[in-house]
Every structure is written in C-alpha cells, then in structure tokens.
Image (tube, grey):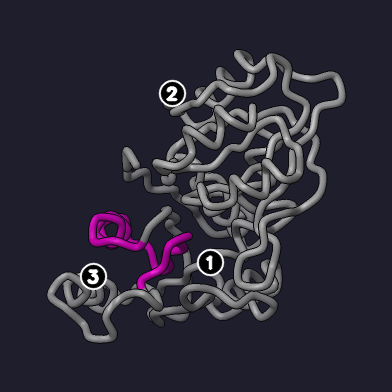
Amino acid sequence: MAERDRIIAYLDDLLEIDAFSDYGPNGLQVPGAEEVSLVVTGVSAQRELFEQAAAAGAELVLCHHGLFWEFHPRSIGPAMKQRLSILFDADISLAGYHLPLDAHPEVGNNALICSALGLERAEPFAEHKGRPIGIVGRSAEGIAFAELRERCARAFEQDPFVWDCGPEVVHSVGIISGGAPGDFTEVIARGLDAFLTGETAEHVMADARENGVHFIAGGHYATERFGIRRLGELVAERFGVEHRFVEIPNPV
C-alpha cells in the first residue's frame, strides 16, 4: 500500500503542474481512499473506465483527459452524476494530467511518440496556454516517408490518415498528440518536412499540398495512450503498487 497524497505530490512535481495554465484542472480532481494498492490508468475519464477500475478494486485512477473542462457546463448533468457516483461508491480517487503530460520532455506523449518513431528529440514548439507543448523529432540520416508511415501504424496500432505531400525522405517531424491541426501553420513556417498529430481538419489538405509538407493524423486517442500509461508504470515502480492500463479504444 502507498499513500495517495504521496503519489499525487510526486506526479504534480514531476509534471510541474503549477507552471501550466490549462483547459481544466491538473492533479487530484476527486478524493477517495487515502491508501492505494492498485492504480488504473486510462486516456479519458468516463463511466466505462470507472466501472472497470471499480471492478478491479482500484483505489486510484489516473487519466489524461479529466472530468472537468472550461468549455463544459458548470452544472452536474445525469452523465456526470453517474460518473461521480461510481467513484464515490467505490471510494476511488481520480487525478488528471493534460497539457503537462503532453509537454513533458521525458514521459510526455510527444516525447514518447518521438522515441517510438526512432526520431531524436529536438526542440519544443507550439505554444498552448503560454507553454510549448509539441516537440520536433529529427533524423540526421533521414527516414523514407513510407517507412515513417509504417512506424506510425505500428506505434499507434492502426493505420494513420495521411496527406503524402512532402519530401520522399523525411528529416524533421513536428509532433503534437491529440487534436492540433491548427498548429500545422507553425510546422510549415518552421520548414519541417512533416507534421504528426491525432486529428485533421478540412483546411489541412490544401495547406499540405500547397506547401509540400506531409500531414499525419494518427488518432486523438491512439496518440495519447503513451504518457498516461508511462505514469502508471512510474508509480508502480516508485511506490510498489500494482498498475493496470485500461484500453477503451476510440476511433477518433
């Protein structure tokens, strides 16, 4: 067993959550049991994740997309009531880590994607809420775009959506997990060969074609499994608790 508050304090410090302004709160969002033996991780806070955590006997759930967002209503509707009821009834604590987990240079989604694709982690880019979130991955020798596409399919366990409009050999890739097609303009301005994110948008096709830059959408969910799973592994290693990552696939 480990103290919940020690785990949360460790994660808050590791991810430097106080240095980020975000679209919702980072850190502990719902307090439950004070002692933890099983940590469940998942990408998004939702009823199915909480049901599986409760069935497994978890005392703590860690997720990338938490329960509360600035663009959601400030009243509790039926769906939110069900989610909270599961947590309350099972005495489960919930913590969420969003932009700090995207941006972290070692355990963040973007850094881990960079490594999974065999790229060297280079400079940060793409400022969100006052902090750079993305990372540029580089390859001095270059990677054939067809090979890069295959590496993405293996890393994300699904075929990415691609506009193949850039050079045949890729030396630089801007990486931002999740939904960041709006940052494609910065990738173009920086002269990078390719952009990898989770989702696309209507304007991207013309931008990719007219600027000669590859665009890869690996899936919002698929590109954001990396960091939260790694957090669970770190907690298990450091605090001697059990960790389970719960897969709830989302095609987006």
Relative to the observer, which residue lies in front, 107 or 148?
Answer: 148
Q: Position of residue 168 (x, y in %)?
A: 68, 14
Q: Secondary structure at mark 3?
A: helix
Total residue callouts: 3
Q: Nearer the viewer, residue 111 or 189?
A: 189
Q: Position of residue 12 (x, y in %)?
A: 63, 74
Q: Position of residue 61 (x, y in %)?
A: 42, 64
Task: Judge whether 180 appears above or below 127 on screen.
Answer: above
View extreme (left): residue: 78
Look at mark 2 in the image and give the residue it sits on. 159
Mark earlier in primary sequence (1, 2) = 1
**What residue did someone put label 1 on?**
97
> Which callout, 3 or 1, points at the residue further toward the start of the chain?
3
Please report the bounds of the magenta region as a residue range. 45-67
Residue at disc 1, secondary structure:
loop
Would you name the residue on which mark 3 appears? 83
Q: CA distance from mark 1 to mark 2?
A: 27 Å
- Residue at 67%, 49% in the rendered image: 186
Say left or right for 166 vs 36.
right
- Is residue 169 a member of the stretch shown in magenta? no
Structural crowding at the residue carrying mark 2, measured as other residues with C-alpha within 10 Å and reported as few (<14), some (14–19) or many (≥20): some
Mark 1 closeness class: few <14, some 14–19, many ≥20 residues within 10 Å: many
Q: Inspect the image, locate mark 2, and give the three-letter code of the amino acid beneath it.
A: Asp
Residue 101 falls in image quadrant: bottom right
